[in-house]
Amino acid sequence: MSGTEMNLLVIIWESGFVVKMVLLLLVAMSVFSWTIIIQKNKVLKAVEADDLKFAEKFSSNLGLVEIYHVTKDYPESTMSQMYQTGFEELQKITKKIGTSKSGITLADYFSKYGLEPLERALKKGAVLSNQKLNKLITMLATIGTLAPFVGLFGTVWGIINSFTGLASGGGSIESVAPGIAEALVATAIGLAAAIPAVWFFNIFNNRIGKINSQMEAFAEDYLNLIARSILISKESIPGDNNGV
């Protein structure tokens, strides 16, 4: 086993300049992709844990303002982010109604104009959350797509060197073996860089898709909570951010 590893190191060490640069680029791509994988897995775990905890608080019998205070305890939660943007939009509407001297209540406002402003605020919160969730994810797809072609370039170059050796009169297997070995090593390292990147890209996309489904369901639950709390029970919302 150790002899095989040593032979591989010798092949890499004795490869041509171009192949060495290809291998170096592939190693850099692999290190970068594993850095993204480890970081993204950590972020998604934190998001999933905070979402679960915040969902429990949201489902309790807390009032709108109390839930807003709770959001501060779960900064990684996508639902918490959505709740904050929705609640802050409520505050702006409440403040606007208070300064208009129209005499209408928050319940009157939503009964007349609907909940579209809150829906837009929730979508904004979802977009902000998705920006964080999807950060660097596309880099995994890029590495997974490019790495095999970079390895293929090293493969082609190694084969060119092999045919060059044949053209110079060396027809033995010893004359073409180094170039073929370089080609196979470049192919193998290209696949080794690409496969984990593609694998985890799909895994992370599935996890993010589940989080987005939960966000969509939360948006509906939030609007239902607003309907119960404001349109039915007439709960009031502080209109000043400093008041919460």
Image (spheres, grey):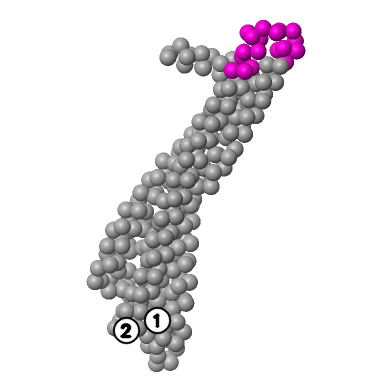
Q: In the rendered image, is residue 98 in sight?
A: no
Q: Nearer the viewer, residue 29 or 170?
A: 170
What residue would you read off at disc 1? Answer: 94
Asked whether 171 falls inside the magenta stretch, the response is yes
Q: Quadrant of residue 122?
A: bottom left
What residue would you read off at disc 2? Answer: 232
Above or below residue 17? Residue 203 is below
- Magenta segment, which residues? 164-181
Q: Quadrant of residue 237?
A: bottom left
At x 62%, y 29%, the residue is 152
Q: Nearer the viewer, residue 203 or 94?
A: 203
Q: CA distance from mark 2 to mark 1?
A: 17 Å
Please state which amino acid type lies under the numbered disc 2: Ile
Please state which amino acid type lies under the numbered disc 1: Thr
- Please tell me whether mark 1 sits on a helix, a strand or a loop: helix
Label 2 crowd (10 A; few <14 / some 14-19 / many >=20) = few
Chief SS of the magenta region: helix
State left or right for residue 188 relative to residue 3. Answer: right
**Farthest residue toward the left?**
61
Q: Of marks 2 and 1, which one's residue comes earlier in the chain?
A: 1
Asked whether 119 falls inside the magenta stretch, the response is no
Residue 80 rendering spot, x and y as whole percentages: 36, 63
